[in-house]
Image (cartoon, rainbow, N blue to C red):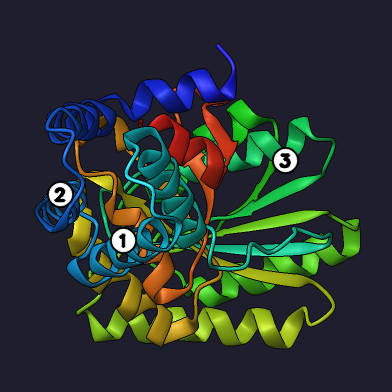
């Protein structure tokens, strides 16, 4: 199954919800104020934020009025274009080597799995990869990450449980510079965004990376569980305020009918989705495509 096939499959619940509601809406063949109000409600029911849904529908309404067109296929096309422009609003960084990728997120979002998949993806692309086991807080975290590193056939740098996480990262950077490694992926302890002590540890890791490897491209990615919906916004804001964020890794989208949250979240916080989990296997991760995501919703 190709990427678009996988994407369409995992968006099944979101697509079914939107398609059924749009079909009912368009069956009236009346495109007026009531139509646009219902269209806004449909977007909100798919977890697009109220402010973004209103902005999208206002743009569609104005364009349709200007063109004096009330054809439902035309309006659907306008809707898809507006959704694409909104989701595609944030700039997507091009990954250059050497690169350090710090991965953050709360517990249970699939962070360890995503790191293993990313390592495998970069390795398959011909890049040399090292993982830094910076989660020294959770019991057996480095052992679980080692399993993924073995599966991806990449190096892993780790210390004993309870060690200083920034020391692990320091050693990993030193090793990567010596071996001219292309990509260093830094795991961090899964933390609730309200835990100030763990956030301070994250800031310390951030300072070590910036200080010790200024020549490398440095990206900070947050892993989000799509079933969290709009509640993920608080997570993103907290981590962004602490260390800044460059992108999102999206997981578990097949488990929700409210995938629209990522459209407004990415737009309002100006943080792009970079990668997209499509399953449980080690190769089930892809570069994110805004166009294919929107097409997959319809």
| Disc 1 crowd, CA 10 A, few/some/many (<14, 14-19, 20+) | many
Q: Is residue 150 above or below residue 293?
A: above
Callout count: 3
Position of residue 92 measured from the top left corner of the image (x, y, whole percent): 64, 62
Residue 188, by quadrant, is: bottom left
Give me the residue at 89% from left, 56% from top. 179
Q: Residues within 10 Å of mark 2 (few under 14, many from 20)?
A: some
State which quarter of the image contains the N terminus: top right
Q: Is residue 243 visible?
A: yes
* Residue that numbered label 1 is attached to: 61
User: Element at badge 3?
Assistant: helix
Closer to viewer: mark 1 or mark 3: 1
Where is residue 69 shown, x and y percent of the image? 38, 48
The residue at 18%/63% (across/down) is 231
Left or right placement of residue 180 versus residue 83 in this view = right
Q: Which mark is residue 133?
A: none
Assign a secondary structure to mark 1. helix
Q: Nearer the viewer, residue 21 or 227?
A: 21
**Horizontal arrangement in the rendering, residue 106 relative to residue 128 (left or right):** left
Residue identified by numbered label 2? 35
**Which quadrant is the C terminus positioned in?**
top left
Identify the residue at horizontal 85%, vertical 66% (top origin): 177
- Sequence-wise, the earlier of marks 2 and 3 is 2
State how far apart marks 1 and 3 are (Cα). 43 Å
The mark that comes first in sequence, 1 or 3, is 1
For the residues labelled 2 and 1, the Cα–Cα distance comes to 10 Å
* Mark 3, residue position: 122
């Amino acid at each position: 199954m190709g990427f678009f096939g996988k994407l369409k499959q995992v968006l099944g619940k979101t697509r079914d919800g939107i398609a059924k509601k749009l079909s009912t809406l368009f069956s009236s063949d009346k495109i007026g104020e009531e139509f646009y109000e219902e269209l806004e409600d449909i977007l909100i029911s798919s977890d697009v934020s109220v402010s973004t849904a209103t902005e999208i529908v206002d743009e569609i309404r104005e364009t349709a009025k200007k063109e004096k067109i009330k054809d439902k296929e035309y309006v659907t096309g306008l809707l898809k274009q507006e959704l694409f422009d909104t989701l595609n609003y944030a700039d997507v960084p091009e990954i250059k080597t050497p690169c350090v990728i710090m991965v953050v997120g709360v517990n249970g979002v699939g962070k360890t799995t995503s790191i293993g998949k990313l390592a495998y993806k970069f390795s398959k692309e011909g890049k040399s990869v090292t993982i830094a086991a910076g989660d020294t807080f959770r019991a057996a975290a480095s052992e679980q990450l080692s399993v993924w590193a073995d599966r991806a056939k990449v190096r892993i740098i780790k210390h004993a449980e309870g060690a200083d996480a920034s020391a692990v990262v320091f050693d990993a950077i030193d090793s990567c510079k010596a071996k001219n490694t292309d990509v260093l992926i830094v795991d961090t302890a899964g933390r609730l965004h309200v835990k100030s002590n763990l956030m301070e540890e994250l800031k310390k890791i951030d300072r070590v990376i910036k200080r010790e490897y200024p020549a490398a491209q440095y990206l900070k990615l947050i892993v989000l569980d799509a079933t969290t919906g709009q509640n993920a916004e608080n997570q993103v804001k907290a981590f962004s305020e602490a260390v800044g964020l460059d992108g999102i890794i999206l997981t578990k989208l097949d488990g929700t009918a409210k995938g629209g949250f990522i459209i407004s979240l990415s737009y309002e916080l100006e943080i792009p989705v970079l990668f997209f989990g499509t399953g449980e296997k080690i190769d089930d991760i892809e570069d994110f495509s805004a166009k294919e995501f929107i097409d997959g919703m319809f």
